[in-house]
Amino acid sequence: MAESVLQDGKIFIGKSTKSEYLQLKLANRHGLITGATGTGKTVTLQNLAEGFSSAGVPVFAADIKGDLCGLAAVGKEKGFIAKRSKVVGLENDFQYRAFPCVFWDVFGELGHPIRATPLDMGPLLLARMLELNDVQEGVLNIAFRVAADEKMPILDMKDVRALIVSVAERSKEISKKYGNVATASVGAIQRRLLVLEDQGGDLFFGEPALDIQDFMRVAPDGRGVINILAADQLMQKPRLYATFLLWMLTRLWQTMPEVGDLDKPKLVYFFDEAHLLFDGAPSALLDQIEQIARLIRSKGVGVYFITQNPLDVPDTVSAQLGNRIQHALRAYTPREQKAVRAAATTFRQNPDLDTEEVIKELEVGEALVSMLENKGEPSIVQRTLIRPPESQIGPLTSDERRGVIEYSPFYGKYEDVIDRESAHEILKKRTDAAAKAAAEQAAREAKERGEEAEADAGGGSWTDVIMGGPKPRSRRRSRGRRRQGMGDMIGRELQRSISRTIASTIKRTIMNSLGGRR
């Protein structure tokens, strides 16, 4: 195992007045990587991913710009990399190498498809994804409750649609048990579902759903597998991106067992563009994020938020992030100046540094670093030159990416969609059965009306026939009348035909006689 990445249970980050490390036994205490665009956050993330992988720790990270996939390729020798490795003291131990990676993609184009069911996501996260208000979220909660009570699985988008329609049609019945179902809210939810489908939500919802344990693999050589989510297209739908990553984090929290503090994490989760998670988030969602951040470390999971501005992360969550790397910030506007001051005050101060000024002076590839040490206290902040990565800086070619995908142990597991019976099919069967029953009832009523009409039309004297038929009489329902056979019906029709012919002949004779007399 290369000393340039891992040293005595510590990940080498870079060089300040001393070597800066992240201790693996404290890595599940979470972290924060911040800095303006173009200051080196992606390379820092790449370095940490390499370090965790070398330690046998699986990693999940979202690839926002498409550069992070370079982890799967051997780094290319470049002058600035050689210079940087020498400055940080790695000229003798540095080696270029690739790392074991698995590529994922919600849209199934640049990696294995990732799917979830609406049932797994739950109404809270789904309402967040659909941008519903409180009243609309209440209707969605009712729909999920009805589905649970009536044993109807919600596995894809058409299940959600069918369920919302069913709740609207049964609103009077449902309102008595679950609460009011507003027609306007139903319409709003349906419109939001259409928007989500246009954004690719129909590709995300379905089966086979992701097995979260597939993120926990270790390669045959003992290194942790780095799971990379292709997020450049997903970022065009920011609400879908943020909710999706939060869903995965929630699944980890819900499914992994309690393990307490370990010598190294079981998984490290990098949440890039974290501000998208918190922008406009309702209080219930913020409470859930805070709870996850506080408790998931006992599951052996470390969470690292990456964002531009430290103010993007609420204080209740930021307080849980002990390992911090701060790249340069700009301070042109009052809000930016406030962000610089806020970032400076989060560090354990170094008497030899004016932290607030240094944040504005940092060069690309430099950062202020403060890591947890000893029993969990933060180290004094240091101005640090970040080490260069051993893997490739920059994206793979299309052919290189395709090779990694087809070599993956999950190739073929998630590619084909499964469509089993769920809420949509169950509700369709109910509708079809109700329509069939209604048709049979209508047929029975029509038959009864036909028999009554036949009974009223039968019989009459020859005088009635000659004078134009019997006088109208009141209709009577003929209940219990014996069904007629085909022979009876033919005989009755024949009798009526003969009667009409005789009547016609008699009428002509009488009229001719009267005419001759005139």
Image: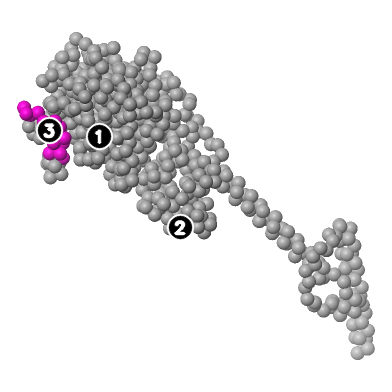
Residue 237 visible in the picture: no
Q: Mark 2 falls on what kind of element?
A: loop
Which residue is at the far left? Answer: 352
Identify the residue at horizontal 70%, vertical 55% (top origin).
440
Instruction: Verify whether residue 340 appears in magenta.
Output: yes
Instruction: Tell me if residue 254 comes above or below residue 85 in the rendering.
Output: below
Q: Which residue is mark 3?
A: 359
Task: Tell me the crowding category of disc 2: few under 14, some 14 to 19, or many 20 or more residues within 10 angstroms, Cα based.
Answer: some
Identify the residue at horizontal 53%, vertical 43% (top origin).
152
Identify the residue at horizontal 82%, vertical 70% (top origin).
457
Which residue is at the far bottom? Answer: 518
- Foreground residue, 193 or 18? 18
Disc 3 vs disc 1: Cβ atoms closer than 8 Å? no
Marks 3 and 2, the one that precedes in the sequence? 2
Identify the residue at horizontal 22%, vertical 40% (top origin).
315
Q: Mark 1 falls on what kind of element?
A: loop
Instruction: Tell me if residue 278 comes above or below residue 184 in the rendering.
Output: above
Q: Which residue is mark 1?
A: 320
Q: Quadrant of residue 467?
A: bottom right
The quarter of the rendered structure image containing the N terminus is: top left
What amino acid type should be assigned to the residue bearing mark 1?
Gln
Q: Which residue is mark 2?
A: 180
Instruction: Tell me if residue 3 comes above or below residue 59 in the rendering.
Output: above
Magenta residues?
Answer: 339-353
Residue 40: give x, y in percent of width and height.
20, 28
What amino acid type should be assigned to the residue bearing mark 2?
Asn
